Image (cartoon, grey):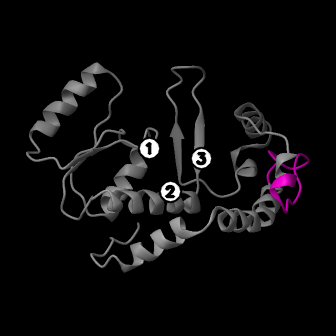
Amino acid sequence: MLPPLSDDISGLVRSIEERFSASPEERREAHERLLPEITSHALGSPVYSGRTYTVRSFEELERLPLTDYHRIHECMVQHGKEECLLAPPVVAFRTSGSTGDPKEFFYGDRDIERILNDYRLYAYLIGFRKGMVGWNLSGAPPDVSGHIVDRVKDALEIDGPTTLLKDDRDLIKALKVISKAGQVDMMASGA
């Protein structure tokens, strides 16, 4: 679990300065320096092996083939999830399949940590504070992003319900739950 954000905003100010004060060229160079590590690591998965190589520039990256969901799914069927994923999954998000076949996406600890840090920063920037009451409309885990929004609520020490909205009847139930909460300071959905 992430530690709660302190009321001392100096760490957030530094993070904001680092993220938003770099020039486009500085941001590009920083991202390009990450490419060899990322692409070398990807070679450990059957999804990418034989299709990629250690990339050192965006120009080289542009020459790599796109890897779509179909390719990833085929490799998982053939080699197994554990062989294909580059880190142990801690959570899997699933789509409903309303526009096609349901899809499943796996996230490891580092993925979740990175997403949570970004969400925490943005939530703090727009005014979410400890003790507020927030309503998570994303849905309870394992549905899409309810897990992330709940973790951010925990890190910011924000109270409030999480509701699962799959159809109109669930909305009525959710409105009954939230009406008992009294004051609601915010509503959030990561979807």
- Mark 1 or mark 2: whose residue is earlier in sequence: 2
Left or right of residue 25, residue 187 in this image: left
Give the residue pinned by disc 3: 106
Are the two marked residues, 1 and 2, in contact with CB atoms closer than 8 angstroms? Answer: no
Q: Quadrant of residue 166?
A: top left
Give the residue pinned by disc 1: 145
Residue at the (55%, 20%) spot, across then down? 99
Give the crowd class for mark 2: few <14, some 14-19, many >=20 residues within 10 Å: few
- Mark 1 or mark 3: whose residue is earlier in sequence: 3
Horizontal and vertical percent for residue 75? 78, 39
Left or right of residue 12, residue 65 in this image: right
Give the crowd class for mark 3: few <14, some 14-19, many >=20 residues within 10 Å: some
Indicate the quadrant containing the C terminus: top left, top right, bottom left or bottom right.
top left
Give the residue pinned by disc 2: 115
Determine which of the numbered discs, if any, sits on residue 179 in the image.
Answer: none
Q: Amino acid at mark 3?
A: Phe
Q: CA distance from mark 1 to mark 2?
A: 11 Å
* Residue 178 magenta-highlighted: no
Q: Describe the element under mark 2 as helix, strand or loop.
A: helix
